[in-house]
């Protein structure tokens, strides 16, 4: 069975964006708004898709799935950040700081960062270094810590630079390994796999570094497991032992109309494109991420920080989105 969580709009709560970096003498928001205004004559939708949704929108999307493999009453909130693809003008330091502030304002118990920090596209007017990226993300706050994995673009650009920068900033990277955490006197496992697309072998041919069986073998007791995997295509192989899988990579297709994306970087098409997926009692949440890839466009799938709330009361399955 395939199920997707519904959504509704919320009223935003006291989030103050970080000061915007100046672009061509304007603040970042003013720059993009002015550009969209100049383009809007007769082409309002392209102006929105290229200038407003990817650069100015930042949503908080909430999920509270009811998961049989997660202990009832073990409340846990997780902030999910993924697919930054850093570099001006779409993802400069001001934008990263805005994202960090938005996540911190939710006061999560745990923060997970799911890879693809490298831009991986040509639309970069000014790069943001791994050191700068890691230092900005190190401002994320959560009592159980901040844990990261690497995405395919990070492996393609050279993973050692990201490993060094994240280590220096105190951000652990999980590559086919696990960590046991304790919350409210109860334990759970956080597992992270390497990318399934780590090496490019040719046209649409890849070799992965992901080792799901080896990662699961590191778990030594029956505490619940949360799995971090950059690409959601791992989900059919995830055992029922895992309470929840969290992924990014797809950007929700970057263009999404009526719950459908015309082009999704997945072997399964729209099956794992976006949102909460439940199959045979197993749960996956795929974030639309925050940056852009290949084309500088988003439409119908705005950048988002995902908040996952586990262990809540029954009847809280509906996701909500706030701007």
Image (cartoon, rainbow, N blue to C red):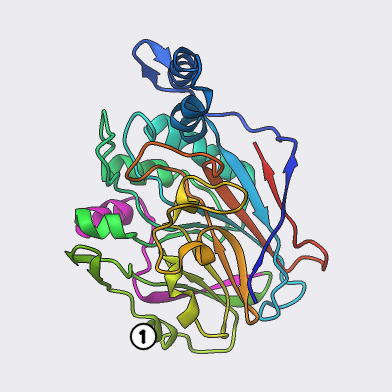
Asked whether 164 falls inside the magenta stretch, the response is: yes
What residue is shown at x 62% (from left), y 53% (from top)?
307
Residue 201 x %, y %: 17, 67
Task: Give whichever of 42, 93 is nearer the camera.
Answer: 42
Say whether residue 287 is left or right of residue 178: right
Q: Residues within 10 Å of mark 1 (few under 14, many from 20)?
A: few
Q: Quadrant of the N terminus?
A: bottom right
Task: Give whichever of 26, 120 is nearer the camera.
Answer: 120
Residue 11 x %, y %: 75, 36
Q: Which residue is mark 1?
A: 214
Q: Is residue 107 above or below residue 70?
A: above
From which residue to which does the magenta span run?
Answer: 159-183
Residue 184 x %, y %: 68, 69
Count all numbered tags in the image, as a single digit.
1
Residue that lies at the very extreme toward the left in this rendered image:
202
Q: Is residue 177 above or below residue 275?
A: below
Residue that lies at the very extreme toward the front in this rendered image:
42
Residue 180 x %, y %: 51, 76
Q: Is residue 124 above or below residue 203?
A: above
Say whether residue 138 is left or right of residue 321: left
What residue is shown at x 23% (from left), y 68% (from top)?
205
Q: Is residue 241 above or below residue 131?
A: below
Task: Give whichever of 307, 187 is nearer the camera.
Answer: 307
Task: Give whichever of 154, 93 is nearer the camera.
Answer: 154
Say whether residue 279 is left or right of residue 189: right
Q: Quadrant of the C terminus?
A: top right
Asked whether 147 falls inside the magenta stretch, the response is: no
> Where on the picture, by quarter, is residue 124?
top left
What residue is shown at x 63% (from left), y 72% (from top)?
2
Q: Secondary structure at mark 1?
A: helix
């Amino acid at each position: 069975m395939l199920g997707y969580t519904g959504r509704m709009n919320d009223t935003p709560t006291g989030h103050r964006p970080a000061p915007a970096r100046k672009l061509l003498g304007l603040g970042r928001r003013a720059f993009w708004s002015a550009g969209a205004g100049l383009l809007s004559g007769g082409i309002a939708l392209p102006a929105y898709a290229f200038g407003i949704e990817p650069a100015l929108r930042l949503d908080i999307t909430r999920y509270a799935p009811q998961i049989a493999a997660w202990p009832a009453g073990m409340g846990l909130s997780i902030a999910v950040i993924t697919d930054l693809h850093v570099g001006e003008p779409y993802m400069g330091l001001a934008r990263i700081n805005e994202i960090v502030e938005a996540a911190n304002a939710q006061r999560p118990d745990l923060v997970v960062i799911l890879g693809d920090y490298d831009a991986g596209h040509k639309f970069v007017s000014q790069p943001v270094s791994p050191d700068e990226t890691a230092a900005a993300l190190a401002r994320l706050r959560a009592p159980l810590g901040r844990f990261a994995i690497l995405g395919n673009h990070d492996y393609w650009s050279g993973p050692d630079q990201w490993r060094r920068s994240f280590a220096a900033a105190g951000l652990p990277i999980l590559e086919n390994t696990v960590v046991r955490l304790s919350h409210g006197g109860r334990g759970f496992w956080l597992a992270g796999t390497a990318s399934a697309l780590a090496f490019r072998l040719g046209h649409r041919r890849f070799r992965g570094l992901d080792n799901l069986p080896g990662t699961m073998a590191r778990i030594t007791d029956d505490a619940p497991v949360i799995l971090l995997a950059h690409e959601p295509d791992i989900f059919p192989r995830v055992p029922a032992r895992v309470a929840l899988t969290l992924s990014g990579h797809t950007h929700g297709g970057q263009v999404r109309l009526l719950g459908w994306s015309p082009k999704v970087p997945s072997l399964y098409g729209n099956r794992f494109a976006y949102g909460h997926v439940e199959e045979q009692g197993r749960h996956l949440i795929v974030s639309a991420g925050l940056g852009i890839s290949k084309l500088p466009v988003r439409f119908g799938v705005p950048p988002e920080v995902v908040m996952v709330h586990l262990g809540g009361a029954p009847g809280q399955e509906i996701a909500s989105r706030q701007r």
